[in-house]
Amino acid sequence: MTTTAAQYATADDRLRQVLRHIADWDAPTPCEGWAARDVVAHLIETERAFLGEQVDLGDDGGVAGGEGAPLADPAAAWAEHADRVRAALADPALAAREYAGFFGPSTVGETFRTFYVFDVVVHRWDLARAAGGAGGAGGAGVAGAVWDEAELDLLDASTAAMGEAIRMEGICGPALAVPAGAGRQERMLAYLGRAAR
């Protein structure tokens, strides 16, 4: 299994745990204007848009009607989509495929890890909050609201790779002030424009 495939599989497994706790798919998330179902649709649509240029993922896994389309069963749509992505990423040749990326020459695997695994990890926190989970340095609430050290390492590497592009419209808003004594997760949340509490 490639590094990208392994990291995606871990991120997917943890996201599915959170999705099982969401009772109200219209619950608001920390992403302004997005309910929980919108966040899941975003994850599916952006991954399909990128990988669809490289490999045939088959049908759309329940996403129809374009950007922001409502999902009748977001957890099922995610599972169907993620199963297809995991199968595609298991091919080392796909992960190693070179192409001209937004930031210059890259590989499918590196781009997917930097942007799309990053997206799953970050939005898992958003969805855990929608499900009633606590964020920040504590561990309370829905499983998935806390990032482990490996995930924080991935977020550090991804944000460094994106640089100021992370502030582009549709990615992350302005960074927030970091409270005194904030831990590593709370600092990362603030950098991503999210309040831990």
Image (tube, rainbow, N blue to C red):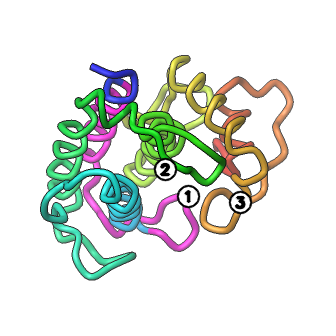
Above or below residue 129? Residue 32 is below
Q: Which residue is mark 2?
A: 126
Looking at the image, tell me whether mark 2 or mark 3 is earlier in sequence order. Answer: 2
Residue at image location 42% in from the left, 35% down from the top: 109
The front one of 13 and 105 is 105
Quarter-of-image position of residue 71: bottom left
Total number of numbered labels?
A: 3
CA separation in Å, label 2 and label 3 = 14 Å
Mark 2: give few (<14), some (14-19) or many (20+) Cα within 10 Å: many
The front one of 12 and 48 is 48
Q: Which residue is mark 3?
A: 173
Looking at the image, tell me whether mark 2 or mark 1 is earlier in sequence order. Answer: 1
Question: Hey, what amino acid is under mark 1?
Answer: Pro
Q: Which residue is mark 1?
A: 30
Tell whether label 1 touches label 2 (CB within 8 Å).
yes
Q: Position of residue 28 (x, y in %)?
A: 46, 65
Magenta stretch, residue numbers: 7-34
Quarter-of-image position of residue 9: top left
Query: In the rendered view of the protein, which quadrant contains the N terminus?
Result: top left
Magenta stretch containing residue 22, yes or no? yes
Q: Position of residue 57 (x, y in %)?
A: 19, 54
Mark 1: give few (<14), some (14-19) or many (20+) Cα within 10 Å: some
Q: Position of residue 156 (x, y in %)?
A: 66, 29
Above or below residue 48? Residue 66 is below
The front one of 37 and 90 is 90
CA separation in Å, label 2 and label 1 = 6 Å
Question: Would you say residue 133 is visible in this rendering?
Answer: no
Looking at the image, tell me whether mark 3 or mark 1 is earlier in sequence order. Answer: 1
Question: Would you say residue 72 is visible in this rendering?
Answer: yes
**Label 2 vs label 3, nearer the camera:** 3
